[in-house]
Image (cartoon, helix red, strand yellow):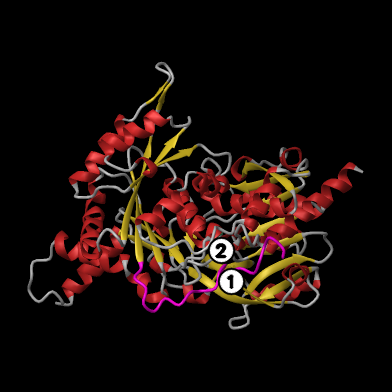
């Protein structure tokens, strides 16, 4: 069997769960943020899934935004979109990439959402004159949302990651909700994993446990004794350190798990397996081991990832380059598609704002492929359009995503159709040639949160097109997040001159994919393929783009 498989097929047959009680695992963070709770949660979920359990992960974020859709990518990284159109935290991307199963709006909750629901109920008079308070009303709503997926999909295990760090004021209602759920369900059915940092003091040449002791104390003050400590560290934990942590933090020795810095996030499930995190979890939750974990495909992927036989250089032309998290799913998609091609994909971020007419050729021509990234607003547009011109003329493999596709349409309008002021109305509302314009259902919308075209939509591929060849089927479904679209008034002229609309939404006629017929690889997509690439099912467009870049590189060198 190939090591990649159809997206969204359950990895294991779903067991009969009628009499089952869902087990809850909560993951909290201590000492500092950015320790990788999402990766630890996803790795544990992967191991449990590989043992045959039906598992999902959800994230509760303590900030007050209703969702991260209104957050600047510099603040919080990429906004990840689910099939059902929820704008969510980027950790959901990790969950999907690791588990190869989709998440939904129920998998990401924020304080904003919780309060919105409670306040709406209060306005509707649902509380019957009671004083509405954090406890019990906010905590009840948190608990309701924490247990929502249990009813929806018969999960055997639900892992809940709590954003932020223990000790933050805004985390308190979540910790109180966990305390209550533990009281309600009992310790056989709930488990708390505390992810913490064991800093290394190089002057003393010592790993220090004190910050973790304090962090556990903080957790204890909320009534929660963690069951397992996962310890992020740059150096291996000695037996003594493990014993000390166990003693001072009141956990079993076996429940002190080392999470040493990994070469790639995809190593973490294997590291956790070695530390027996999954076995400890199952024992504590009184769950019988079903199988030994089936990680054949995962290990095959890792083998290919670590032993590439080829290399390509890809330029990522974008404007949020200072923070790689802003393009998280694109970077990860290249890891998946590179591995399947046994190819190391070197990505060089190029700031579109710094691309000037006289430097564009020298900056971009050495690359084997150019991806023009998604984005919003006018800043950096000129550089993106000029980059497209270069790749079109020099026949360098091109992949445009969302705004990148729109730039390709504008460039074609300007330079091939000679429509001098061709533009997207997002950038030039007064243009006489709006090749990209606002979708009719976006007219008049002023609110920013949750109002874009969001989530999965069908797309029919033109027979014989490059897109059709790549996907190997005619009907696909991809996720969207945009307000503007290709203007169909220009479609005939585009097609007559060699720019084919190879993907069309069958219900609305919106153009979803454009490709150049006289170019070896020039594809622009209005949707976000990067949101559906997983370890076990790398996205076909990324796989094909890497292949095209390899081909181009070979040609160049010969
Ligand atoms: N700004 C463009 C739009 O709203 C593209 C969005 C994107 O790249 N995600 O249509």
Mark 1 lies within 8 Å of ligand 1 (Cβ measured):
no
Q: Quadrant of residue 487?
A: bottom right
Of mark 2 and mark 1, the one earlier in the sequence is: 1
Give the quadrant of the N terminus: bottom right
Mark 2: few/some/many CA within 10 Å (<14, 14-19, 20+): many
* Residue for point 51% across, 67% down: 102
* Residue for point 35% across, 59% down: 285
Question: Tag 1's secondary structure?
Answer: loop
Mark 1: few/some/many CA within 10 Å (<14, 14-19, 20+): few
- The residue at the far front in this view is 288
Q: Is residue 3 magenta?
A: yes
* Residue for point 56% across, 61% down: 531
Q: Which residues are magenta?
A: 1-22
Q: Which residue is mark 1?
A: 9
Q: Tell me if 538 is positioned left or right of 260 in this view.
A: right
Relative depth, front residue between 92 and 23 = 23
Q: CA–CA distance between discs 2 and 1? A: 8 Å
Relative depth, front residue between 182 and 89 = 182
Determine the quadrant in which ligand 1 lies. bottom right
Q: Which residue is mark 2?
A: 100
Q: Is residue 151 magenta?
A: no
């Amino acid at each position: 069997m190939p090591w990649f498989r159809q997206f969204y097929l359950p990895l294991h047959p779903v067991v009969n769960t009628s009499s089952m009680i869902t087990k809850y695992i909560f993951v909290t963070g201590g000492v500092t943020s950015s320790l990788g709770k999402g990766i630890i949660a996803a790795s544990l979920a992967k191991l449990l899934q590989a043992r045959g359990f039906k598992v999902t992960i959800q994230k509760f974020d303590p900030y007050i935004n209703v969702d991260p859709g209104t957050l600047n990518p510099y603040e919080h990284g990429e906004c990840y979109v689910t099939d059902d159109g929820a704008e969510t935290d980027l950790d959901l991307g990790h969950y999907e990439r690791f588990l190869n199963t989709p998440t939904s709006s129920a998998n990401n909750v924020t304080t904003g959402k919780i309060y919105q629901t409670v306040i709406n109920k209060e306005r509707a008079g649902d509380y019957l004159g009671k004083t509405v308070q954090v406890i019990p009303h906010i905590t009840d709503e948190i608990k309701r949302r924490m247990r929502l997926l249990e009813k929806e999909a018969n999960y055997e295990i639900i892992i809940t990651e709590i954003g932020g760090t223990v000790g933050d004021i805004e985390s308190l209602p979540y910790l109180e909700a966990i305390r209550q759920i533990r009281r309600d369900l009992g310790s056989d059915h709930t488990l708390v994993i505390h992810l913490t940092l064991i800093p290394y003091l190089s002057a003393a040449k010592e790993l220090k446990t004190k910050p973790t002791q304090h962090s556990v104390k903080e957790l204890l003050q909320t009534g929660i004794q963690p069951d397992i400590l996962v310890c992020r560290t740059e150096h291996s934990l000695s037996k003594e350190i493990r014993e000390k942590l166990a003693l001072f933090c009141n956990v079993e020795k076996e429940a002190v798990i080392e999470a040493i810095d990994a070469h790639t996030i995809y190593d973490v499930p294997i590291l956790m397996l070695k530390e027996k995190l999954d076995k400890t979890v199952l024992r504590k939750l009184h769950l019988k081991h079903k199988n030994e974990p089936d990680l054949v495909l995962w290990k095959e992927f890792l083998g290919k990832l670590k032993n590439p036989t080829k290399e390509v250089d890809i330029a990522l032309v974008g404007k949020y380059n200072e923070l790689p998290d802003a393009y998280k799913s694109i970077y990860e998609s290249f890891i998946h598609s590179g591995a399947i091609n046994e190819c190391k994909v070197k990505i060089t971020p190029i700031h579109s704002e710094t691309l000037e007419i006289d430097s564009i050729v020298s900056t971009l021509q050495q690359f084997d492929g150019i991806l023009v990234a998604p984005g919003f607003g006018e800043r950096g547009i000129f550089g993106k359009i000029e980059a497209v011109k270069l790749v079109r003329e020099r026949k360098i493999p091109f992949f445009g995503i969302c705004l990148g596709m729109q730039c390709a349409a504008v460039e074609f309008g300007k330079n091939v159709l000679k429509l001098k002021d061709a533009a997207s109305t997002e950038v030039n509302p007064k243009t006489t040639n709006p090749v990209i314009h606002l979708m009719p259902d976006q007219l008049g919308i002023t609110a920013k949160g949750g109002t874009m075209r969001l989530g999965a939509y069908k797309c029919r591929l033109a027979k014989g097109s490059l897109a059709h060849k790549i996907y190997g089927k005619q009907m696909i479904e991809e996720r969207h997040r945009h307000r503007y679209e290709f203007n169909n008034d220009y479609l005939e002229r585009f097609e007559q001159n060699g720019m084919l609309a190879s993907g069309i939404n069958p219900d609305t006629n919106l153009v979803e994919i454009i490709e150049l017929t006289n170019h070896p690889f020039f594809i622009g997509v209005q949707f976000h393929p990067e949101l559906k690439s997983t370890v076990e099912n790398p996205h076909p467009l990324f796989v094909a783009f890497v292949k095209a870049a390899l081909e181009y590189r070979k040609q160049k060198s010969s």
